[in-house]
Amino acid sequence: MIKEFCDQKKYMLIAAAVGVISAFLPWASVKAGGFSVSANGLDGGDGYITIILFAAAGYLTFRNEKSEELSGNNLYMVVGGLGLAGLLGLYDLINANSTMPAGNPYASVSIGIGLYLTVLAGLAGAAIPFVLKNNKNKE
């Protein structure tokens, strides 16, 4: 079934799927003293937004003719959804340390794989249509 898709749609669907899965993976962990707490994307609420954006982008990519590239408003909606999800993840990545209480030298935040994958899937997925332009399926 995946062979039916043009390269653009194939890679955009993979990016959307990785983005949805990344919301369930650890986004950050906080270590303070002897305690460590890990949180995934659904714990803070931003993961729900990224799941909706990635799922909508995946649906819009999947619903049209499989062998033809996205174009027009459909392309803009998919790129916008993927890009917005990636930017939201990037915002969380940049502001991860600012959520810590000031003046606590014993606390540290480490970014988890889920947040990195959210940023990567969103921004790479938004770039795919421009990188793989006019690359139709030959079959």
Image: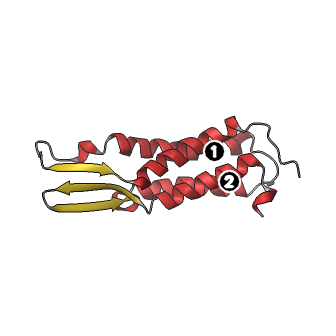
Residue 127's tag is none
Q: In this view, does 32 lie to the left or right of 6?
A: left
Residue shown at 80% from the left, 37% from the top:
134
Q: What element carries label 2?
A: helix
Relative to 99, does residue 131 appear above or below in the rendering?
above
Which amino acid type is shown beneath numbered disc 1?
Met
- Residue marked by disc 1: 77
Q: x and y percent of residue 117 in the render?
A: 48, 51
Q: Is residue 136 left or right of residue 127?
A: right
Residue 60's tag is 2
Residue shown at 24% from the left, 47% from the top:
99
Q: x and y percent of residue 122 in the render?
A: 54, 46
Residue shown at 75% from the left, 41% from the top:
71
Q: In which quarter of the image is the N terminus?
A: bottom right
Q: Is mark 1 on a helix, strand or loop?
A: helix
What is the spatial separation of the Cα atoms under label 2 and label 1, in whole angstroms?
8 Å
Relative to 25, does residue 99 appear above or below in the rendering?
above
Q: x and y percent of residue 34 in the render?
A: 14, 61
Which amino acid type is shown beneath numbered disc 2?
Leu
Q: Can residue 118 be seen in this view?
A: yes
Q: Residue furthest right?
A: 139
Q: Where, by quadrant of the figure, is residue 133 drawn?
A: top right
Q: Which one is in front, 33 or 67? A: 33
Q: Is residue 118 left or right of residue 15?
A: left
* Mark 1 residue crowding within 10 angstroms, few (<14) / some (14–19) / many (20+): some
Question: Contact (CB < 8 A) between labels 2 and 1?
Answer: yes
Residue shown at 12% from the left, 57% from the top:
33
Q: x and y percent of residue 91 in the render?
A: 39, 41
